[in-house]
């Protein structure tokens, strides 16, 4: 059962938040990395694109918190399904967010190398993301309102920034104030721990570069067939 719901966009510190929440005892935390390392998780998300009922307990079976897409796009549904869960909206400077999204999507060409040159693990992951495309299309269309489809790059900056600011405003207006924390990971442990009612750890807040972490992971997968957890490098 989820205790913490992530409502922030990708590239707003969600990788650092995953590491932080797990350090605070709210793990495992569901993140896009769960799909990257366990492609069979695609099946958990396919019902979200069909318009039918979704069993959120089944989607998040085994997890206590969530971050990043696809999870954060459905934060409202999670808030209803888990009424005791706290909601954390991660934010950052919108222009820096846009540059980070561009950097992340620069990994795209590496994922389009010929099938004969791919290790089996890479082929399995690309097949999984092909099946996840309806979910990603739904998220992109509802987020950017431009007919965005899986495989396209981030929209032009004006469109993307408008989507970012619209999302932040909608979460602030819609989420119950007593359940919501608007959080920049640069603030560190104190506001997060105070909100969650836990002690501040005697160690630095984890700051993981999401775009570089993802690029490194995808590069190893495409060249060596190694699918590794990015949290092995936590520090």
Image (cartoon, rainbow, N blue to C red):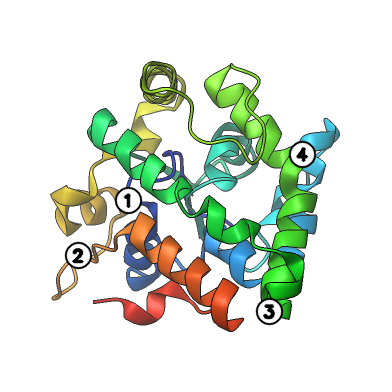
Q: Earlier in the sequence, mark 2 or mark 4?
A: 4
Evaluate if marks 2 and 4 touch, with contact meaning CB atoms under 8 Å apart: no
Q: Are marks 3 and 1 in contact (CB under 8 Å)?
A: no
Q: Residue 9: horizontal and vertical position, in percent?
A: 43, 38
Q: At numbered mark 1, what does the secondary structure look like: helix, strand or loop?
A: loop
**Which residue is at the front of the view, 80 or 157?**
157
| Residue 196, visible in the rendered structure | yes
Give the secondary structure at mark 4.
Answer: helix
Report the Cα–Cα distance between label 3 and label 2: 35 Å
Q: Nearer the viewer, residue 60 or 133?
A: 133
Q: Position of residue 175 (x, y in %)?
A: 44, 27
Task: Determine which residue is flagged by label 2.
Answer: 205
- Number of residues whose C-alpha sits closer than 10 Å to that of mark 3, classed few (under 14), some (14–19) or many (20 or more): some
Q: State the separation of the CA atoms marked 3 and 1.
A: 30 Å
**First along the sequence among labels 3 and 1:** 1
Q: Point out the image quarter for the N terminus.
A: bottom right
Q: Which residue is mark 1?
A: 13
Q: Position of residue 133 (x, y in %)?
A: 73, 43
Which of the 4 image quarters holds residue 136?
top right
Q: Classify mark 2: residues with Cα within 10 Å, few (<14), some (14-19) or many (20+).
A: many
Q: Quadrant of residue 202?
A: bottom left
Image height of 136 relative to 229, above or below? above
- Residue labelled with disc 4: 134
Nearer to me, 46 or 155: 155
**Residue to which mark 3 is pinned:** 119
For the C terminus, which image quadrant?
bottom left
- Binning the other alpha carbons within 10 Å of mark 1 as few (below 14), some (14 to 19) or many (20 upward) gives many
- Distance, label 2 to label 4, CA atoms, is 35 Å
Secondary structure at numbered mark 2: loop
């Amino acid at each position: 059962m989820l205790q913490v719901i992530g409502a922030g966009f990708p590239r707003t510190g969600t990788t650092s938040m995953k590491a932080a929440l797990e350090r605070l005892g709210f793990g495992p935390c569901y993140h896009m990395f769960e799909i990257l390392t366990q492609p069979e998780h695609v099946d958990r998300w396919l019902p979200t694109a069909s318009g039918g009922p979704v069993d959120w307990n089944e989607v998040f079976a085994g997890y206590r918190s969530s971050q990043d897409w696809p999870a954060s796009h459905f934060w409202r549904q999670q808030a209803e399904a888990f009424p005791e869960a706290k909601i954390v909206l991660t934010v950052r400077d919108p222009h820096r967010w846009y540059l980070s999204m561009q950097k992340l999507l620069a990994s795209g060409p590496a994922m389009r190398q010929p099938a004969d040159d791919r290790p089996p693990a890479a082929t399995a992951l690309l097949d999984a993301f092909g099946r996840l495309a309806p979910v990603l299309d739904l998220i992109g269309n509802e987020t950017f309102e431009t007919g965005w489809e899986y495989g396209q790059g981030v929209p032009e900056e004006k469109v993307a920034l408008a989507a970012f600011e619209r999302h932040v405003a909608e979460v602030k207006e819609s989420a119950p104030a007593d359940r919501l924390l608007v959080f920049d990971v640069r603030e560190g442990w104190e506001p997060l721990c105070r909100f969650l009612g836990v002690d501040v750890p005697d160690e630095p807040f984890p700051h993981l570069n999401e775009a570089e972490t993802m690029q490194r992971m995808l590069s190893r997968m495409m060249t060596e067939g190694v699918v590794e957890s990015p949290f092995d490098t936590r520090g």
